[in-house]
Image (tube, helix red, strand yellow):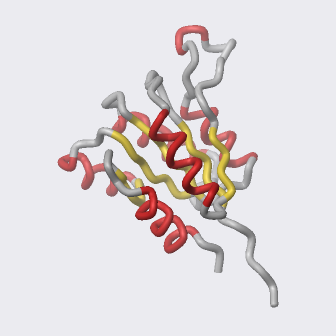
Amino acid sequence: MTQSAPVRVVIAKPGLDGHDRGAKVVARALRDAGVEVVYTGLHQMPEVVYTGLHQMPEQIVATAIQEDADAIGLSILSGSHMTQCAKVIEILKEKDASDIKVFAGGIIPEADFPALKEMGVVEIFTPGTPTQEIIDWVNANLAHA
């Protein structure tokens, strides 16, 4: 009997959003559930001084490709969800990596859900979503056959 590889997810905080508690909670819950998690954190980017301690979509996609991720989970509390999700999905397409799914969480108005789904965001989790619900979604939608 061959055991399939565990699901691998990159959890990232794009743009100018510095609140990472929710991302850390989700990353830990997924890890504890057996998912391989790469949490990008709020890293210094010396080549892009104006962004300070924040991840740019290009870095997030590069990490996901390098880590052979099944998905990218974007945690966005700044209101820039439309822009950040669109940019990550655009770069994934440019890099021929559209097989990497994108899901999002954070302060995202329900009115924006249809547009996000249309652009390619496969799931959206809002504040208060139980971590077990996120784990169940990851296992049901990202598990290797």
Question: Which residue, as the protein is rendered here, is positioned at the far right?
Answer: 1
Quarter of the view holding residue 84: top left
Q: Residue at x 74, y 49 (%)?
A: 67
Figure check: 131 above or below 52: below
Question: x, y percentage for residue 118?
Answer: 32, 56
Figure check: 118 above or below 137: above
Q: How many marks?
A: 0
Question: x, y percentage for residue 119?
Answer: 37, 52
**121 on left or right of 97:** left
Question: Which residue, as the protein is rendered here, is positioned at the far bottom?
Answer: 1
Q: Residue at x 57, y 44 (%)?
A: 11
Question: x, y percentage for residue 40?
Answer: 63, 36
**38 on left or right of 90:** right
Figure check: 53 above or below 86: above
Figure check: 130 above or below 54: below
**77 on left or right of 4:** left
Name the image quarter holding the C terminus: bottom right
Q: Residue at x 55, y 54 (%)?
A: 29
Quarter of the view holding residue 16: top left
Question: x, y percentage for residue 9?
Answer: 61, 54
Question: Relative to the observer, which residue lies in front, 122 or 127?
Answer: 127
Q: Residue at x 67, y 45 (%)?
A: 38
